[in-house]
Image (cartoon, rainbow, N blue to C red):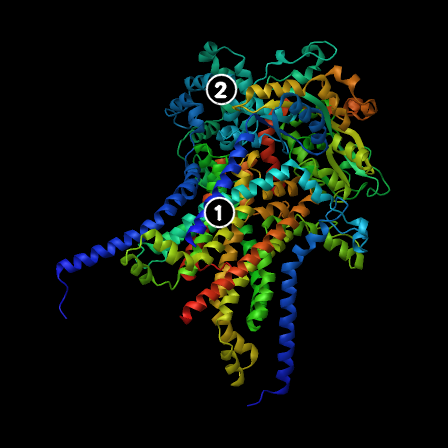
Amino acid sequence: MARSLTTRFSAFALAAALGTAGFAASAEESLTVVSWGGAYGVAQKKHVIDPFQKDTGVKVLFEDYSGGVAEIKAQVESGNIQWDVVDFEVIDLERACSEGLLESIPHEDLPAGVDGKSAAEDFIPEALASECAVGNIVWSVVFAYNEKTIGGTKAASIEDFFDTKKIPGKRALRKRPQVNMEWALLADGVAPKDVYEVLATPEGQQRAFDKLATIKDDLVWFDSWSQAPQLLNDGGAVLVQSANGRFYDAIRQENKPFVIVWDGHVYDLDAWAIVKGTQKKDLALKFIAYATGSKPLAGMPDVAYGPTRKSSMPLADPTAAPHLPTAHLDKGIQASSDFWADYGESLGEKFNEWLLK
Amino acid sequence: MSSLTTTEADQAASARSKKRLTAFLFVVPLLAFILLTFVAPIGSMLWRSVHHPAVAELIPLTLVELQRWDGTALPDETTLNVFAQELHGLAKERLSGKLSEELNRAYTGMSSVVKSSARRIARIETEQLATQGAGTLLKAHGNWSKPEVWYAIKRAGAVYTYDYYLTALDLELHPEQGIQVREDTQIYLQLYGKTLNMALVITLFCALLGYPLAYYLAGLPENRANLLLVLVLLPFWTSLLVRTTAWIALLQTNGVINSFLLSTGLISQPIEMLYTSFATVVAMTHILLPFMILPLYSVMRGIDPSYLRAALSLGAKPIPAFARIYFPMTLPGLSAGALLVFIISVGYYITPALVGGTDGQMISNIIAFHMQRSNNWELAAALGSLLLGLILLLYWVYDRFVGASNIKLG
Amino acid sequence: MKIPAYYGFWHHLGAWLLKTSSWLVLLFLIMPILVIIPLSFNVEPFFSFTEGMLTLQPEAYSLRWYREIFNDPKWILAIQNSFLIGIFATLLATVLGTCAAVGLARDDMPYRRFITALLLSPMIVPLIITAAGMFFFYSNMGLAGSYLGVILAHAALGTPFVIITVTATLTGFDYSLARAALNLGATPLRVFFDIIMPLIRPGVISGALFAFITSFDEVVVILFMAGPQQRTIPRQMFSGLREQINPSILAIATLLILVSIALLITLELLRRRSERLRGVELIE
């Protein structure tokens, strides 16, 4: 009996050990790329990740995260680097860059566009503004309603978002101060060009919190953009904040009766960055150069995000053009990366305390 | 009977210590393993809650200068110049963000002050800063002329600190008045209170639901009881995530319960149940109920029913008879189950994180928040150490009255 | 002495109340788990019953979400990881735990109470604390984000269960048997495998099952310490529930329920076998 048990045990252990060896082998020459999942993730997988894997033979572990600096910071500070390349909201980028969490990227190594123009000419200037990243899309934070649940009065402006009398019901926001503070001031009558100036003062911050407090009882908070279309769909909230592409995808792919309200939208770039201290910096640079090429970027309008290369537009699906943030710039403001680099930490803390009140 | 000779006694003693050694040798591998993989990590957390060299590493020279400072007025110009130079260096190496974060913890609002000052100072030559650093700094932001700020910097520079425990207990250290209750916000004590309260409610629900069921099962013939016990054991063996998922499916706005109630016409609007403390309590009661039922059942099985029958036949009324005779005999099972449920629920993380929303969060969730979101690991460690102290106290009580190895696993 | 008639009525009412409430509690325990199973066959991407499902229309049901799982490399990796980590952690926990339980069960074990409490503490210390500590410590050791790190961590969490189940089978074990065998010239290893092992085997196996399920179900340590390479089923479920709730989680949940039913049956068979073995010994 003892022997049979031992034999079985060792056979088992051997099989298991071989299993691990297999794992170890497959783990070589791989790159962990982290982005936002959802419709955007699907588009990136199709136009960036899959072609890259096919062309280079590198295995890409394509992970989702829900934004912010915290996870990268934890990795860099503990020395336990798990991610190589990350798709950042530029609103968080400057903060991560100034805290030394990202590698710098030599922009002169980026390839020229398909039309032969150099990278410096081809990219819009904002895309190459930071030494830590290369911008890949222009997108926007908007809110939307569901034709089925909105009732008689439809929302048309950012003021309506804060007007529970006009449009009763829950509102859903992503749980963070970014964009929400801007919206509160816009709705409170601050002129779009003054928003960040006002927000830099203690009185302005208080004003934003006071405005948010007027609808606090009607607010539903979520952690990740992908929860937003779900909330709008199942009636969890009447007005829901999300990235414009998430709503666009739900409308186009799943025929959801959602309507996007562009008033007061906060547009921003997303950018690829490299986590400081990664073992695979060269591979990561190669990936970013590939991912920000004219052709992969031309796939982004599939989810209503504008490519940052001018040479990509002629290659893209023309029907998406009116849905890109660039078609609505007059109604919105640009997110300030510098402002949030300075105030992200302290406003984040105030915001969390305000939430717990 | 003659007493043992010395040699005999020695032999007996050496045989005994040999046996003790043999027994101990069996345990050594696991003991070493647990010390290394489990106790040492927890020790490292305790260590981190008091050991914090980050600021001391970022601005060592400033801290040396600050030692001369009496703490009343503004530090002298040399100190400020040195600080400006160090800040310049940090900005160049992209480390000023780290400093801003650290100082922000010591003095609220410093994050944007440090960052904007660092940007301004980075533009000036180091040589110039050696003489004009102080002026530039004071011009960059009004906060630099506050002695409180420098007091906070000096404190943050200490390598060993109990400040995080103060924060975890909603206290703060004031330069003159000493330790006092934090003025601006009090979060953590309230949260500890809420956690204990919720754990108590969950324990109570488990007892209320578990006791009658265990009693009923104990009165059934053994075969039938074993069959029904499967219904208790299946949830016990089912993944925690599965059970939590189930409660999400049941409780959400257009979930199973709401659609059922709507279709019967009992309600006209869906009830908000998910993402509340109600959801946390219900889901955790469901998850922890088997921990209550199993020890109760095993104690009740061991009680001879003829006691109660005898009392009844002697004329005792059923309820007093039950309360005076049967109930005391089940107390060991009840206390074992209740303590275990209470201990587990105080430290619970996953279920509140998934179904609790903002108001169903417990102390574990705020620890996770400081670990993963705000990156304040030292505060997380201090909060965790307090929680650990509480748990170990409860564990000690459990071990004394129940015995650690008597945990019922079905 | 006769019990008055109205006692009978109250007695009946009491018994009826007890029975009803017990069944309600049983329903509360089992219903949430059973609800998941039909929902996982929902053709719609919702977490609730559609009208079609309630009227039992076949087109309202589908295997869509099961296909989704088995076509998604992330779920496949998670399933592989869960088993791989679980098996190694179980092996480690079972070997170390059984050995320690044999020592702890001996009367001459020094500091028994304290050591037992210490060795069982991984079961009691809140996972969030364990996970935070492991994050700091294992990162320093370079073990965070590696299979080895996760396996060691899970093994530590599983050992208490092995100790408890093995100790339970060892109570009342007569060590003079082992001593007799040793005196007759048997090697200690042989004594262990031929005399102790057969007796404690049910305990060892059920302890191993507990250790396995502990690892298989563990998510907090994974959340804090593991990298993307070591994603397990619960970790994948956790992020799914946090970010995008869709019925593929219900499909995997249904599969996990089947796993737990299998484990439960195994345990029950072991218990019967153990009882039979012990019964035989008593007769002899």
Considering the image in quadrants, where does the N terminus of chain B appear? bottom left
Q: Report whether residue B346 is seen.
A: yes
Residue type marked 1: Thr
Q: Name the residue under label 1.
A: C90
- Residue C62's label in the rendered image is none
Foreground pick, B187 / C206: C206
Q: Residue drawn at (51%, 72%), measured in percent from left and top?
A: B327
**Residue A33: quadrant of the picture:** top right
Q: Report whether residue C154 is seen.
A: no
Q: Is residue B366 above or below residue B333?
A: above
Percent x, y of residue B243: 62, 52
In this picture, residue A51 sits left or right of residue B239: right
Q: Which structural element holds mark 1?
A: helix
**Residue A167: quadrant of the picture:** top right
**Residue B201: quadrant of the picture:** bottom right
Q: Which structural element holds mark 2?
A: helix
Percent x, y of residue C150: 50, 39
In this picture, residue C132 sits left or right of residue A56: left
Q: Residue drawn at (49%, 36%), measured in percent from left and top?
A: B377
Q: Mark 1 lies on which chain?
A: C
Foreground pick, B107 / A222: A222
Percent x, y of residue C205: 48, 54
Within-10-Å neighbours for mark 1: few <14, some 14–19, many 20+: many
Within-10-Å neighbours for mark 2: few <14, some 14–19, many 20+: many
Foreground pick, C182 / B245: C182
In this picture, residue B387 sits left or right of residue B160: right
Q: Residue drawn at (59%, 53%), measured in percent from left and top?
A: C260
In this picture, residue C47 sits left or right of residue C273: right
Q: Name the residue under label 2.
A: B90
Q: Residue drawn at (67%, 49%), measured in percent from left and top?
A: B248
